[in-house]
């Protein structure tokens, strides 16, 4: 019987393999046929984004957009910003979210999006684009990124079908790790750090999610601009990882090889450098001819004089035509909407609410002030520059960068009013705004607080204080928000402070003035609904931080990814300040309490290359049902190269009812114990590994057990 089953399995496997080979052959044959009939002009035309329909050969137009947290087009569903998506620690929910984004894109003919951002934002909150990242940890970023891509592109038979689109993983690579916290500043990063910290999320995108497109980073990496880095693109990405999609430049970055990096003296040199490095398509938003490099005006004479360059043109164009073929565009070209107005469905908006709820992080809750009981309060003050909606440049500034104008936006004020109805009086005052140092609104805010039983204070930042191009040399609350918080605290009323913002801020002083603190980041179009659900206990917050919060700008960069230092001998400390972050990576509270048992391994000793199972019991000993994010960190105790004190290797978001105990199980596969040795070869070294399990990266929140690998 076993022999029969084996034979049948081999036959099916063989048939499946033959089918895949046949499919690849058909694809290659089709693409070769198209490219062989194209003129030089037609080939170059394809190498710029949004190339027009080629009527002679029937080559369809591939329309693009951004979709970092929803399509960057009016009418689209605006989901929480990327940093908030990371805070859900819920990849399956993110995959569901991007499936809605893909459907909205297809509805208007968009088939290619410039997302997700797989940068590992390693501890520098001065950097404005930290809000676009899932966090400071390579494993977490890879899990969220893979989920995002799979939802956008589809899997199996649904891969790039009529309901899915091509994703673009960006910015390749080490973009946030610059010297000054400035967007696009140069990066000097060791080969080891590239492979350990910055490569994993992109490698996972290629190998696991089959991402269809990548975008190089703006900056100079170790002396070579990413857009001219053949080692990075051809050797690592294509040869080592097997990437078979296409590369699109970041906006105007082919031209920047000349204007910014100064390694090309003219447009033609810049274009040839990028082409040879493997940048297939040039992005210049608006297609300003002064900024375009991949054009016949720039390239024709050079190619005609040096025919050896045609092999690069042909390789680039083949990858672009292949992408269109895989999207099924030659069989059924998408109908591209002229007005580009997206229709957001009720299902997508409900998903936006689910994601927002999952993302909310409770950081402080003295005396269990939260959740508020509507039956026990008669009035509530809602105060702050982020309390009510604000529109600037035809968009809500509380939704984060790279978002369109949603069909509606629910503010904190509106969410609370909807929640309490006419049973609780709501006293609103803005207090101050982000864009001036005026304290004229303080008296009204103080009066609102004095005339209320409790204060909800919505502060933080907005898309005009954080995001691309909004790097800062301090990380304090902008404007006079800190003074507003102090003025409200002097009323003696209990304060629930809500942060709506895009970067970790220096709020140590402010945290001491309030009774409860919620970090929401940017929660999208359902912001007020999600926060009201949390504030009044209809949803128990379960989100966790994916970035460490510094105590001040002098602590930067701050991250849990530390290596051993002189702390144990009394050295390595700032003279008058703590080295500990204000809030740790992975930290977040709940309205209930969870108790962890001692972790158990299926075996205390394994051979290198074997897996081991890890189990731990988590009991809800509080009064509310809730979600707990169980985190697993591993430390290689003694190794041939320096190792981090611990690194995240697994996590699971589990829902546990009050009084219930759940056994959470992880399979720790061999890759969890791998390192790059002194020769940069991936290996597993024999020795002991300490495995930490708990609710955050903070030492007091972790249980540990030791595994021996022989």
Image: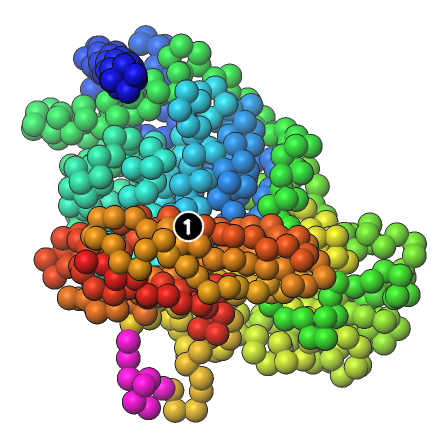
- Seen at 63% across and 59% down, the residue is 620
40 in magenta: no
Residue furthest to the front? 1
Q: Residues within 10 Å of mark 1 (few under 14, many from 20)?
A: some
Vertical placement of residue 27 versus 137, above or below: above
What predominant SS class does the magenta segment belong to?
loop
* Magenta residues (range): 564-573
Question: In this view of the protein, can residue 440 be seen by the observer?
Answer: no
On the rendered structure, is 285 left or right of 695? left
Vertical placement of residue 278 versus 691, above or below: above
The number of numbered discs placed on residues in the rendered structure image is: 1
- The quadrant holding residue 233 is top left
- The quadrant holding residue 628 is bottom right
- Seen at 23% across and 58% down, the residue is 709
- Seen at 60% across and 30% down, the residue is 342
x then y, percent, for residue 168: 38, 37
- The quadrant holding residue 588 is bottom right
- Seen at 64% across and 54% down, the residue is 660
x then y, percent, for residue 547: 46, 63
* Front residue of this view, candidates 71 and 282: 71
569 in magenta: yes
On the rendered structure, is 91 left or right of 361? left
On-image quarter of the C terminus: bottom left
On-image quarter of the N terminus: top left
Vertical placement of residue 158 versus 150, above or below: above
* Front residue of this view, candidates 498 and 580: 580
x then y, percent, for residue 6: 26, 19
Question: In this view of the protein, can residue 304 be seen by the observer?
Answer: yes
Q: Secondary structure at mark 1?
A: strand
Q: Which residue is mark 1?
A: 666
* Front residue of this view, candidates 643 and 477: 643
């Amino acid at each position: 019987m076993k022999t029969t089953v084996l034979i049948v399995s081999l036959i099916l496997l063989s048939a499946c393999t033959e089918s895949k080979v046949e499919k690849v052959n058909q694809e290659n044959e089709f693409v070769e046929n198209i490219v062989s009939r194209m003129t030089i002009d037609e080939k170059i035309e394809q190498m710029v984004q949004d190339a027009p329909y080629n009527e002679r050969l029937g080559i369809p137009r591939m329309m693009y957009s951004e979709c970092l947290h929803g399509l960057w087009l009016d009418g689209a569903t605006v989901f929480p910003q990327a940093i908030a998506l990371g805070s859900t620690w819920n990849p399956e929910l993110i995959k569901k979210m991007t499936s809605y984004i893909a459907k909205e894109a297809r509805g208007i003919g968009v088939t290619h999006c410039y997302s997700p951002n797989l940068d590992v934002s390693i501890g520098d909150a001065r950097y404005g684009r930290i809000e676009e990242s899932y966090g400071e940890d390579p494993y977490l970023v890879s899990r969220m990124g893979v989920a995002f891509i799979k939802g956008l592109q589809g899997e199996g038979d649904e891969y790039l079908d009529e309901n899915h689109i091509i994703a673009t993983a960006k910015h390749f690579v080490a973009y946030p790790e610059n010297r000054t916290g400035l967007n696009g500043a140069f990066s000097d990063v060791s080969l080891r750090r590239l492979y350990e910290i910055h490569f994993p999320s992109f490698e996972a995108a290629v190998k696991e999610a089959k991402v269809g497109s990548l975008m190089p980073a703006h900056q100079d990496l170790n002396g070579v601009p990413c857009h001219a880095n053949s080692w990075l693109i051809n050797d690592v990405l294509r040869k080592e990882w097997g990437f078979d999609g296409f590369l699109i430049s970041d906006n105007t970055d082919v031209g920047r090889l000349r204007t910014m990096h100064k390694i090309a003296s003219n447009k033609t040199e810049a274009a040839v450098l990028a082409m040879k490095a493997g940048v297939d398509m040039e992005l210049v938003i608006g297609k300003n001819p002064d900024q375009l490099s991949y054009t016949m005006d720039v390239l024709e004479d050079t190619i005609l004089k040096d025919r050896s360059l045609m092999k690069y043109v042909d390789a680039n164009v083949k990858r672009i035509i292949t992408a269109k073929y895989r999207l099924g565009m030659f069989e059924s070209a998408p109908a591209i909407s002229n007005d580009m107005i997206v229709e957001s469905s009720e299902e997508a908006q409900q998903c936006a609410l689910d994601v927002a709820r999952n993302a909310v992080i409770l950081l402080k809750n003295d005396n269990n002030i939260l959740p508020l009981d509507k039956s026990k309060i008669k009035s509530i003050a809602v105060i702050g520059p982020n309390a009510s909606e604000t529109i600037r440049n035809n968009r809500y500034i509380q939704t984060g960068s790279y978002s369109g104008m949603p069909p509606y936006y629910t503010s904190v004020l509106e969410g609370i009013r909807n929640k309490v109805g006419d049973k609780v009086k709501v006293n609103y005052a803005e207090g101050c705004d982000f864009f001036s140092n005026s304290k004229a609104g303080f008296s009204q805010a103080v009066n609102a607080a004095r005339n209320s039983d409790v204060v909800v204070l919505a502060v933080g930042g907005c898309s005009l204080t954080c995001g691309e191009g909004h790097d800062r040399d301090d990380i304090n609350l902008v404007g006079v928000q800190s003074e507003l918080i102090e003025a409200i605290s002097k009323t003696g009323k209990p304060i629930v402070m809500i942060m709506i913002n895009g970067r970790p801020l220096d709020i140590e002083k402010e945290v001491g003035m309030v009774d409860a603190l919620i970090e929401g980041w940017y929660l999208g179009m359902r912001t007020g609904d999600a926060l009201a659900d949390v504030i009044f206990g209809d949803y128990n917050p379960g989100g966790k931080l994916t970035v460490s919060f510094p105590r001040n700008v002098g602590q930067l960069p701050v991250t849990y990814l530390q290596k051993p230092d002189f702390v144990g001998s009394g050295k390595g400390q700032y003279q008058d300040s703590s080295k500990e972050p204000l809030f740790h990576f992975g930290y977040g509270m709940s309205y209930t309490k969870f108790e962890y048992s001692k972790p158990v391994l299926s075996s205390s000793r394994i051979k290198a290359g074997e897996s081991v199972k890890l189990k731990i019991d988590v009991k809800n000993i509080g009064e509310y049902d809730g979600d707990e994010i169980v985190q697993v960190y591993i430390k290689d105790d003694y190794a041939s190269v320096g190792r981090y004190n611990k690194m995240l290797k697994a996590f699971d978001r589990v829902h546990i009812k009050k009084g219930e105990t759940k056994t959470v199980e992880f399979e720790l596969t061999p890759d969890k114990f791998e390192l790059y040795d002194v020769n940069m070869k991936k290996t597993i070294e024999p020795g002991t590994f300490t495995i930490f399990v708990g609710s955050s990266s903070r030492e007091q929140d972790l249980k540990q057990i030791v595994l021996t690998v022989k």
